[in-house]
Image (tube, rainbow, N blue to C red):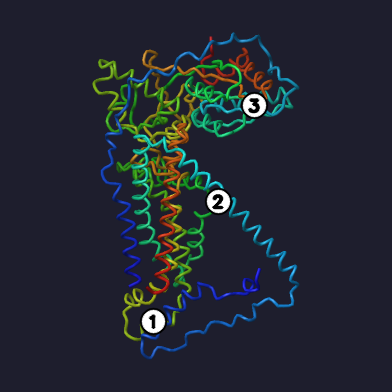
Amino acid sequence: MNSRLVISLLAFVICVGLVPFGPTPVAAQRGAWDCSAQPTGGEAGKATPPSTSMPGGGFPRGGGELTVFAAASLSDAFEAIERDLEVANPDLSITYNFGGSQALVTQLEEGAEADVFASANVAQMAAATEAELIAGDAVPFVRNRLAIVTPANNPAGIESPADLGTDGILLVLAQPEVPAGRYARESVCKMGTDVETYGTGFTDRVAANVVSEEEDVRDVLTKVALGEADAGIVYVSDATTAADQVQVIDIPDEVNAVAAYPIAALAGGDEELASAFIAYLLSDEGQAHLASFGFETVE
Amino acid sequence: MSSRSLTVEPTGDAMIQGSPRQMRQSALPNAPSAAPAPRPIASAVIPKAMNGLAERTRGVTVWTLAALLVLFLAVPIGALLVRALGAGTGWDARTYDTLRQALGLSMATTALTMVVVIVSGTPLAYLLARRRFRGAAVVEALVDLPIVLPPAVAGIALLVAFGRNGLVGQWLAEGGVTLGFTTIAVVMAQVFVSAPFYVIAARAGFARVDRDVEAAAADLGASPGRVFRTVTLPLIAPSLIAGAVLAWARALGEFGATIMFAGNFPGVTQTMPLAIYARFGAGDMPAALLLSGVLLVASLAVLLGVRVVGARVREGF
């Protein structure tokens, strides 16, 4: 009797589990990209002219504790900059929180405390501004563009962006709300309009190849570098940092998306310290530093 | 605080083992009537001479500490429910779609995981509890290990084993089988992290069963299969159910290994925890709250349901 009860309980759990699983409209979900959406690259306000060289940054009081919330794509460059700045300013201590720009805005809205916010697109900076998280104005401090990456051994033999439409390749993108994911979809949509080069139904074919939507662009890079995915679309800067683990395939300018990264001091943070950090990034030294990580400088 | 709570009561556990066994024995003629009487509990009673004030102070301390932890657990859960109820406007088509796909996938994958875990975990638990074999200690340690491993380690372990460049995965890839980004990978991650919870509980259950009772049934001519079905299984059912619930809960909450090994795609690999994380990461807090609220209520319902059923099983029905 008891064993029968256990078995029927089990059967019940399984049945309940399988009912909603039924025919999920996966196919409908895939290939349903809205290519009519407005491009999100845009201008991120006026770029302040890069200030004259300020070696090591002019940090007030010689430093202090600075917390920076930054887009995941900035992690390598910012970590290198941290090392240099902390050597030049022994009293300066920088703490980073890297993530998808959306997630960072959510964290800030939920009360996370920080001094600087560096977003990978204008939309998220606008959201932060709207939520009155920002002190002063956001300025663009760096640009980035997209590239296709494949594992070093390129198992699917991808040679050009058109190959992203090849049936059955394992393509990984950042999720649509993450700037990198949005730019990637915009770029593919642009390719789709060029039927001569990319063939008919290109956008749908690419959308059907997406096997995972990652939380941020670094996760895309990791999945590709590990060889789990056949291809991914990331920023040129990401591709640069993993040059030994991936093959990089350029995306032509006319179908590429240019990401402008805005940065701003946060309300309630140490604005003096924040301004000094932003000024350093805009200085010749800071811009050169960012350029060495595959970013494009502003101006 | 009364002195009653300082005495050792016969535990529910003792009753679990006691009552069905005694029932079975009385049902079998000639069975040895050696059902152990409950042990006297007087020896565990704290001497009455204890200072009343000290006792009261201790009582207050115990209650305060306990209340602090309850409060700490209740506040986030309460806040989540309140915010989730307040996020009703987040119920758009997108959120509903995400919920339907993610909840469906979570239920289906955890159900499949439970089948795998119970079907292979019960024999393993039986062997570990009843048979002495070479390497048993190693197997036991291996089974315990995933419980203490952080999910990220489980994810990397699965990747280097079953990923396309992994130890086993590269052979599979040559044969044209890719596990990554499939629902099977989700189940694999769940089995890896949840099976130990079931095996440990089941092993303890098997170890507690009085072998004499099984022997008695066998002497009376019951086949080994019948002994297992009619004697052993009813006795260990509470252990199995408790283990299965723990394992199921762990599988349902599985996140780290899944997102690393299986990826994140709606309807294929995006279970509830991944969907919640994805909505949160997308800056869609209302949807993240709603999905969390649904998962919380569903989990609560299952836990309560299992409690009710478990109590009936214990009563021998």
Left or right, residue A97 beside residue A178: right
Q: Considering the image in quadrants, where does the N terminus of chain A appear?
A: bottom left
Query: What is the spatial separation of the Cα atoms under label 3 and label 1, in whole angstroms?
Result: 71 Å
In the image, residue A151 sits, relative to residue B202, either above or below, namely above
Label 3 with label 1: CB-CB less than 8 Å: no
Element class at badge 1: helix
Residue at the location (23% across, 21% down)?
A200
Q: Residues within 10 Å of mark 3 (few under 14, many from 20)?
A: few
Between disc 3 and disc 1, the foreground one is 3
- In-front residue for pair B65/A33: B65
Three-letter residue code for mark 2 = Ala
Left or right, residue A64 beside residue A70: right
Query: What is the spatial separation of the Cα atoms under label 2 and label 3, in whole angstroms?
Result: 30 Å
Tag 2 and tag 3 share a subunit: no
Three-letter residue code for mark 1 = Arg
- In-front residue for pair A286/A22: A22
The residue pinned by badge 2 equals: B74
Chain letter for the residue marked with disc 1 in the picture = B
Q: Residues within 10 Å of mark 2 (few under 14, many from 20)?
A: few
Whichever of callouts 1 and 2 sits on the residue coming sooner in the sequence is: 1
Quadrant in which residue B42 is drawn = bottom right
Give the numbered dot on residue A118: none
> How many numbered marks, from 0 up?
3
The residue pinned by badge 1 equals: B24
The residue pinned by badge 3 equals: A268
Q: Residue A296: where, in percent of width, then height?
A: 51, 15
Element class at badge 3: loop
